[in-house]
Amino acid sequence: MAKNKDNIVRANSTKKKNTNIRKRENSNPNGYIFMAPYALVFIVFILVPVALAVILSFTNFNAVQMPSFTGFLNYITLITSDEVFMQHVLPNTVVYAVVVGIGGYVLAFILAWALCNLTKLPRTIFALILYSPSMTIGVAMTVLWKTIFSGDQTGLLNSWLMSLGVINEPILWLISTDYLLAIVIIVGLWSSMGVGFLSMISGILNSDEELYEAAAIDGVKNRFQEMIYITIPQMKPQMLFAAVMAVVNAFQNGMISTWLTGNPSPNYAAQLIVNHIEDYGFLRFEMGYAAAVSVVLLLIVQLFSKVCNTLLTEKDE
């Protein structure tokens, strides 16, 4: 009897505590005040543009006259009549996203794990060196990469290959369709160490050291086993964030080919979906069609983000 009475008292106490918590949650307006600035920015700069893009995707709009409703015509044209999109843009985007997205993600983790095995000063210096390309990529396009891949004898890559006897005459790297996509991928990998890379460093540095000591007692013998069994399971949130950022950056990073070769690229050899949107929206002023392509890109990014979330989110038992 006494045990049952204690259980009833404990249950009533827990119920009363949960009720008080719900009251505080429902009656505290300060949360809405603190959320207001972010909510306003989110609505104005993200939610409203996305909604407008979806609406415009069902119209014929040239940015001058009023939009006219066309239904699903833009999407039907994209799938059935846009040969450039199906033959060049979509395959290029898939190849670029797979190599730069997955490759950059794996490379970011390996470099972050390697840096975390260094002392603080060299780790900070190398992290800054690896992160800086993601901030200075626009300047680097004109100063560094165009100089390297210049199509005359003064280009650094041509000069080096000719001095080694590999080639006899300069190669037009930024015009040749055989090399252009590979060059864009190389530059994309070079600039892929962004905030996802920093989040991985943070996740590794904040790992629980006691787990490493316990693992050593249980038979973990080297750093590779520590990485597989201790480090990665502890930093799932950081890895999920880095994966989503890698997917988003891989699909939206279309400025590289524009900076190197202009838009459209020669024979559409390095044309990505973002370049296709810019081509139709800001060069041809077919805003309705460009909006439809942007909606398709949004759905693709959402699909890949969902896959990353499914793979890296821990499931409750």
Image (cartoon, rainbow, N blue to C red):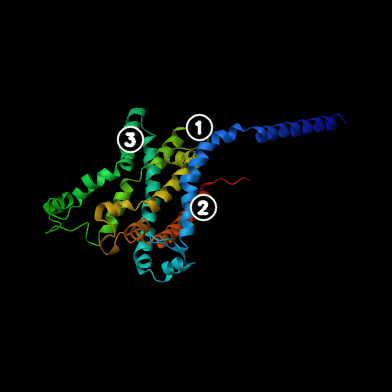
Element class at badge 2: helix
In the image, taking residue 242 as reference, residue 83 lies left or right, namely: left
The residue lying at 28 percent from left, 45 percent from top is 138
Amino acid type of the residue tagged 3 in the rendering = Leu
Residue placed furthest toward the bottom? 80
| Residue lying at 46% horizontally and 56% vertically, measured from the top left | 53
Name the residue at 51% across, 52% down: 306
Q: Which residue is mark 1?
A: 208
- Tell me the distance, in whole angstroms, between the alpha carbons under discs 1 and 2: 29 Å
Dividing the picture into quadrants, the one containing residue 167 is bottom left
9 shown above or below 234? above
Residue 211: image location, x then y, percent: 52, 33
- Using the image as rendered, state which of residue 316 and residue 297 is in the foreground: 297
Q: Visible in this render: residue 233?
A: no
Location of residue 174 by image quarter:
bottom left
| Picture disc at residue 306 | 2
Q: Residue at x 46, y 61 (%)?
A: 57
Numbered-mark total: 3
Q: Quadrant of the N terminus?
A: top right
Amino acid found under the numbered disc labelled 1: Asp
- Tell me: 15 left or right of 205: right
Residue extending farthest to the right is 1
- Number of residues whose C-alpha sits closer than 10 Å to that of mark 2, classed few (under 14), some (14–19) or many (20 or more): few
- In this rendering, the label closer to the viewer, 3 or 1: 3
**Label 3 with label 1: CB-CB less than 8 Å:** no
Residue underneath mark 3: 128
Which badge, 1 or 2, is on the more N-terminal residue?
A: 1
Q: Hey, what amino acid is under mark 2?
A: Lys
SS state under label 3: helix
If you read the primary sequence from the N terminus, does the residue marked by circle 2 or circle 3 appear first? 3
